Amino acid sequence: MINSYTSWQPLEEVIVGRAYSPDYFDFIDNPQVRAQLQQILAETAEDLDALSRVIEQYGARVRRPDLMPRDLFVRQQIQGQGAPLPPLTPRDWQITLGQKLLRVLPMTELDSICAEYSDQVIDPHAGSWDPDCILNGASASCIVRVGRDVFFDNSDFLRPDQTEWIVQNCLGPEYRVHEAVTDGHGDAVFAILKPGVILSSKHDMHLHLQEDFPGWDVLKIWDSSIWAAMEVGKFKYESNPGAWYVQGQTPTPEFTEFVNTYLTKWTGFVAETVFDVNCLVLDESNVIFSAYNKEVFAFCERHRITPIVSELRHSYFWDGGISCCTQDLTRRGGLETYL
């Protein structure tokens, strides 16, 4: 049963994303490009499998998306269509609002999971791509649930008319709606670890956290961990200015051209993302992060939260952190008022 009103009530069921397996790209002629991409895919699969095991160790059920059939995928690439997004970041495409699952963007690889909850699913796309759908271009990551209070990022990624549609079709009169401008990708701007405890980033300048969350302890992270990673990997910012980055490597010109030509749907603008905020709360005592951060971990421990590291080596390539790569379906608890 779909049931999730916050990001911190005890997690019981969650989707963990999936990338294509390396053999999907056996068709690439250039051996260096093929090897580097297949390494990224293999290590991504290892890390997502490890994340799934960590979640299961804490008692939650993990669901995984399907993959496009390999022969269909290869046929599209040979025809020069460019690689479609893998079902890696389900939090961008759908969100649980109480006992409803809103499919903001269609992703067929999630159809089989969503079909199990069909009577609770709200899908404005009706199973197909509708060019006139009100939610086209929106992102579910722009919605933050705080029990009775729901925050919407009205930006290029969630317009006011899209917010209004979601409020009218998904929320009842028991909810209170707030605006929280983060310019998109809200789950990498602030995260609620439990009542009274918030992580935020340097991108929260348009938020009013002290007013909206009076008395709550807020830790603002100013420096994204990507800059340290880039320095270690001798990444040349000038050659690929912040769009994507392969940890520990300097991409060859051939690989860079391949990514920027055929994988344009995969990458974002990773230099602005603060993955230290992009986390998954298992419950009020345990939170999963993709990397160690001394300041964040000290903050967690001060609030009696155990920080758990489940590495995502290629977050800087995919522009997707722990929160992006997971989407909760069920959390234990009901609708509460926290503000």
Image (cartoon, rainbow, N blue to C red):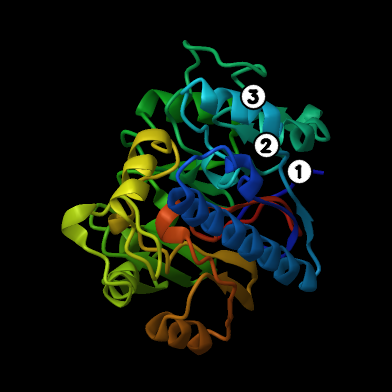
Three-letter amino acid code of the residue under disc 3: Asp
Mark 3 or 2, nearer chain start:
2
Foreground: 330 or 277? 277
Badge 3 density bin: few <14, some 14–19, many ≥20, Cα 10 Å: some
- Residue 44, by quadrant, is bottom right
CA distance for labels 1 and 2: 7 Å
Q: Where is residue 163 in the image (x, y as percent from the top left)?
A: 44, 30
Badge 1 density bin: few <14, some 14–19, many ≥20, Cα 10 Å: many
- Label annotation for residue 2: 1
Q: Residue furthest left?
A: 238
Q: Position of residue 336 (x, y in %)?
A: 64, 56
Q: Position of residue 62 (x, y in %)?
A: 77, 56
Q: Mark 2 points at which residue?
A: 101
Mark 3 or 1, nearer chain start:
1
Foreground: 260 or 134? 260
| Image vertical order of residue 315 relative to residue 172, above or below | below
Q: Is residue 319 visible?
A: no
Q: Is 75 positioned to the left or the right of 153 in the image?
A: right
The residue shown at (44%, 88%) is: 298
**Contact? badges 3 and 2 (CB < 8 Å):** no
Three-letter amino acid code of the residue under disc 2: Leu
CA distance for labels 3 and 1: 14 Å
The residue shown at (81%, 68%) is: 59
The residue shown at (52%, 70%) is: 290
Give the mark toward the camera: 3 or 1: 3
**Contact? badges 1 and 2 (CB < 8 Å):** yes
- Label annotation for residue 123: 3
**Contact? badges 3 and 1 (CB < 8 Å):** no
Under circle 2, the secondary element is strand
Under circle 1, the secondary element is loop
Three-letter amino acid code of the residue under disc 1: Ile
